[in-house]
Image (spheres, grey):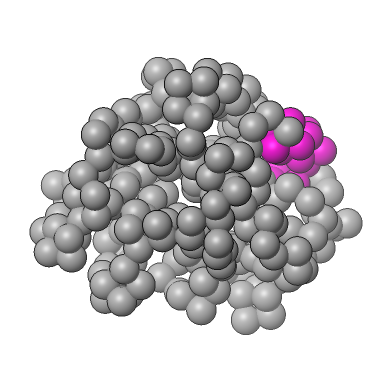
Amino acid sequence: MKIISYNVNGIRAALKKGFAEWLETENPDIIGLQEVKSMENQIDISIFEDLGYHVYWYPAVKKGYSGVAILSKQKANNITAGIGFPAYDDEGRTIRADYDDFSFLCAYFPSGTTGGIRQDFKYAFLDDIFGYTQDLIKERPKLILSGDYNICHKAIDIHNPVSNKNTSGFLPEERAWMDKFTSSGFDDSFRLLNKEAHQYSWWSYRANARANNKGWRIDYHMTTPSISSQVKNVGILNKVMHSDHCPIVVEF
């Protein structure tokens, strides 16, 4: 099973940059997309269906903003859009696909980079998705929570931890939440197999950051132990450039 997570920063823009051709070549069993920034009727869904994917779309109410989707070769037994909190669900933050033996939850965590209200919104989301996933793993113990968490967990995950210590995405409170999350039934699957530094999944568009690999690792496949024990390959596909993020892969 090959699963990819990818913040495409606008699916319509990504399609113009060759996303569909890349997807055909890469050929994951499942891909979770974040920041699709599109209603389902604003793109030609047959592009994905012709590649053999079932398409599950959950946009934000606000057009051109946020939104998540799952493309899956196997038809899901059940799709759950949102986590039951209108404040987040109206922004198209999460979509879950249940299969016979595991569940895949695709999530786009809020960014707090504008500070103030949105940082508080981010903290509220962290509290609520923690509670949601703790309940969920009781009924769906084989679970993958993949997506853009908008948090670097450890110093190894960011190019300059000292200068960014007061920056949203690397704040002590956010990192403490990641400590709690990864101590409560979820593993950072990438770090199960790759302990190397300079492994990033997002780069600012400013200051030639990507060319200089001055990035952040804020995209994760978090797996519960029954999946973690089966993980056989992980990767960050940093040569793929449809977005300011790159795709991340896990195979089990």
Relative horizontal placement of residue 42, taking residue 129 as reference (left or right): left
Q: Looking at the picture, tell me which residue is in the foreground, 15 or 107.
A: 107
Q: Is residue 79 above or below residue 11?
A: above
Q: Quadrant of residue 204?
A: bottom right
Range of magenta residues: 168-182
Q: Is residue 83 visible?
A: yes
Q: Position of residue 76 (x, y in %)?
A: 25, 39
Q: Residue at x 83, y 49 (%)?
A: 165
The quarter of the picture where the N terminus appears is: bottom left
Relative horizontal placement of residue 126, taking residue 252 as reference (left or right): right
Q: Is residue 9 above or below residue 88?
A: below
Q: Residue at x 37, y 27 (%)?
A: 82
Q: Residue furthest right?
A: 162
Q: Residue at x 45, y 21 (%)?
A: 139
Tell me the chief SS of the magenta region.
Answer: helix
Q: Looking at the picture, tell me which residue is in the foreground, 29 or 252.
A: 252
Q: Position of residue 146 (x, y in %)?
A: 50, 46
Q: Is residue 151 above or below residue 133?
A: below
Q: Total of numbered circles in the picture?
A: 0
Q: Is residue 95 visible?
A: no
Can residue 220 be found in the magenta stretch? no
Q: Looking at the picture, tell me which residue is in the foreground, 193 or 217.
A: 193
Q: Position of residue 64 (x, y in %)?
A: 32, 47
Q: Residue at x 79, y 60 (%)?
A: 156
Q: Quadrant of residue 43?
A: bottom left
